[in-house]
Image (cartoon, rainbow, N blue to C red):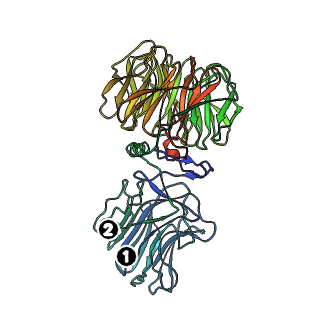
Amino acid sequence: MSNSILQNPLGKTLRCDDGSLVTQPKFGSGACQFNGQNAYLSLSDSNDWNFGSGDFTIDCWVNWSSLPTVDQQSIITKTGGPGYRSFLLDFDSTNVIRFIYSIDGTNVIVKTFSWTPSVNIWYHLAVIRNGVNDLKVFVNGTQIGSTQSFDGSAIFKSTSNVIVGSYYGGNFFTGSIDELRISKGIARWTSNFTPQTTSYTPDSYTKLLLHFDNNLVDSSNNNYGVTNYNSSLIGVSSFNDFKKLLNISVGAGQYTAKTIISSYSLTYSANYAYYGAVLAPNGDIHFVPRNATVGQKLKPDGSSSTYSLIYTTTAAYYGGVLAPNGDIHFIPFFASVGQKVSPSGVVSTYSLVFTSISAYRGGVLAPNGDIHFVPANYAPVGQKVNTISSVVSTYSLVLTGVGYMGGVLAPNGDIHFIPFNAPVGQKVSVSGVVSTYSLICTASNGAYACGCLAPNGDIHMARYQVSVGQKIDTTTGIVSTYSLVHSTPGEGYYGAVLAPNGDIYFVPYASPVGQKINTVTGIVSTYAMAYTFGSGHVGGVLDSKGVIHFVQDYDGKCQKISTAPCQPFSPAVCCSPFLNKF
């Protein structure tokens, strides 16, 4: 997973496993990232890139991951050397935006505009020729520097390609670009303006429009082909766009099931040691400490190791969540403090607003980066931690006094609490509104223990005691049940994990068989387990090779099942709020 990119629907910043920062798109479902070493885009020569002496506008959203320390970083160019020079837009090490052009292909005319950006911030950048004389540059709609004279001449008509992110094999741009547009025959802005807050729609002046929404398609009416040299499409910024990515990731037939089941021993194996697991950005699986006095993780090579914790107590934490900055938060059950592990391995604690025995049983990452604790039997309030500011706060619930056992983030941003003893479903909207909805199957002795989002947007509740499966269509709100193959009360499941082929695997707690549902056909089936034991497994996590790990609760044995070919696939499939949860 070296130098891999984590795609994150929150529009926040995540860390790569090499410690570098990755920004999410400004608009839509993608942006284009340039590594500053060898990445660029190329478009063939066209008369659309020859501006002559007419008006033009080049604008885009730019996000620098590092600023140049020597020379300059090229944003867009149509110049291949003497005799081929048309124009070049770049940013140099003296904090100057430069628009360079030629009127004869050889002599260079340089126009400079002083400005100092910050890294990892999106800026709207626009270069505009208005009439035969005026050249202006705007950042976030505000003109920088003075209006430069264009001396009325036509820009040289070269036969070279347009290059984005490089100056023909050098001066590579380091960062991300979104909404790149070239407009010919129009000065779109002649004075300060407010940049558009949505993706562009092409008009008759639009000669090139790249949204970078998980592709390199030109959305102008010209449909120019774009050749990609080592750049990467990153990120998704909305839940609907991420749902599309999820559908692609679990497309039917994309992965061939292997169904290889095995078990492995842990370094620390006391009874009731851990209660759930979370996949870290570097590929390590961290087990969530319940009664364990040490933290434990499993590396991609299969080796297991432990690390020191700050806070340990009986029944301390009951689930974990990956935050956008790479921290893993353990969710308090009996614990009086929150505890987290940073990507560098630093363990720390933080104060909670509400602390009580048997308070919360799981957590879910919200669209704004807050982690919501899922209320169990004794929490009369909801509790959340802002992973950016670290502020912990509480909010009122509709239903209190009966429990939930897990939570799932729906595509519209609602967080659904999974009913254990609760007679109704409860959810929290993006705006913070808490509401309930009716269920078909309710039980007072533990109906469901976890839930999982299917590619079609349904949330499946993993049964514990009940004899049917239950799901909710998050678009229509319709709740329905379906028959299970294995439904012995007391031999239930304590978790659910979505596999790359679209199957949902229920995590066996006391069940002697594994059970899964094909979310496309609705077929429920069982399979033999390598290791069966009462109170066996209490959570599951998908790793980057398509292997689902069932996390041991008792007797020190973990179990895993290979659901896809062993070659790694995008960490976006598993390191996300939809898939990487307790």
Mark 2 sits on what residue?
222
Where is residue 548? Give x, y as percent. 53, 34
Asked whether residue 338 is in view, the answer is no
Residue nearest the observer in this picture, 388 or 227: 227
Based on the displayed image, in which of its 4 quarters is residue 465 positioned? Answer: top left
Which residue is the site of mark 1? 46
Residue 449 at what x, y percent from top left? 47, 22
Vertical order, 381 against 177 (above or below) = above
Q: Give the residue drawn at x 32%, y 35%.
A: 475
Q: How many marks?
A: 2
Identify which residue is drawn at 66% across, 31% down. 296
- The tag earlier along the polypeptide, 1 or 2, is 1
- Tell me, yes or no, whether the two marked residues, 1 and 2, touch with CB atoms within 8 Å: yes
Relative depth, front residue between 289 and 252? 252
Q: Residues within 10 Å of mark 2 (few under 14, many from 20)?
A: few
Using residue 134 as the reference point, say whether residue 497 is left or right of it: right
Q: Quick check: 377 above or below 523?
A: above
**Rendering coords of residue 255 (x, y %):** 46, 43
- Mark 1, secondary structure of its residue: loop
Q: Identity of the amino acid at label 2?
A: Asn
